[in-house]
Amino acid sequence: MGKMCYIYLMRREPKTIATNRKAYHDFHIEEKFEAGVVLSGTEVKSLREGKANLKESYARIKDGEIFLVNAHISPYTCGNIYNHEPKRERKLLMHKREIDRLYGKVRERGYTLVPLSLYFNERNRVKVEFGLAKGKTSFDKREDIKRRDEKRINERESRSR
């Protein structure tokens, strides 16, 4: 009998391109969602170089479609005159049902869609993780800082014993 060779494909870990750490500081994230992003060729190449920034970006629902607004993807370094515009609106790919559900939530006072991270998934597709968020007040932010400091002090004390 002939020998059989099995090839096991390694599952690739999602490669994070950019994170929006300030979102966790400024918002209460109530629910997380994932969506694909419609990009041009030079945008993908720029993302492979890790040149993206989600600071002050958000998602907006317009005419039954969802868009990523104000996300900065730097122009590709080896690009030419056909390079992309860095802060253009980028369409997100989600099921219609999910978009309708999100639209109902966002219409409520105080809710917004905040991107949390931008990454390549296992199949090398660019995905954005965003959260349905409600803004924090300055009091909430101070409480979080106090809680974090207390936790840090307790851990330090338990290590020293």
Image: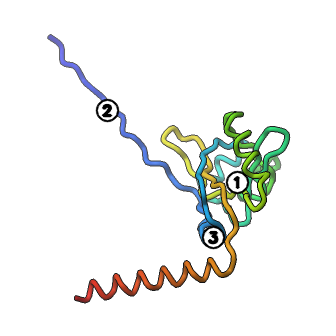
Q: How many numbered discs, if any? A: 3
In this view, the residue in front, 8 or 49, is: 8
Instruction: Examine the rendered structure and indicate whether residue 109 appears above or below residue 102.
Output: below
User: Which disc number belongs to residue 8?
Assistant: 2
Q: How is the image coloured?
A: rainbow
Mark-to-mark CA distance, 2 and 3: 39 Å
Residue that appears at 48% across and 48% down:
14
Of marks 1 and 3, the one in the foreground: 3
Q: Label 1, secondary structure: give it.
A: loop
- Tell me where residue 156 appears, x and y as whole percent: 33, 86
Q: Residues within 10 Å of mark 2 (few under 14, many from 20)?
A: few
The mark lying in front, picked from 2 and 3, is 3
* Residue closest to the far front: 108
Please state which of residues 93 and 112 is positioned toward the viewer in this rendering: 112
The residue labelled by disc 1 is 76
Cα–Cα span, label 1 and label 3: 26 Å
Check if mark 2's residue and mark 3's residue have beta carbons within 8 Å.
Answer: no
Disc 1 crowd, CA 10 A, few/some/many (<14, 14-19, 20+): many
The residue at the point 74 percent across, 39 percent down is 100
Residue 103, image x, y percentages: 76, 45
Q: Which residue is mark 3?
A: 22
- Inspect the image, locate mark 1, and give the three-letter code of the amino acid beneath it: Tyr
Q: Is residue 1 above or below residue 142?
A: above
Quick check: 5 above or below 60? above
Which sits earlier in the primary sequence, circle 1 or circle 3? 3
Q: CA distance from mark 2 to mark 1?
A: 34 Å
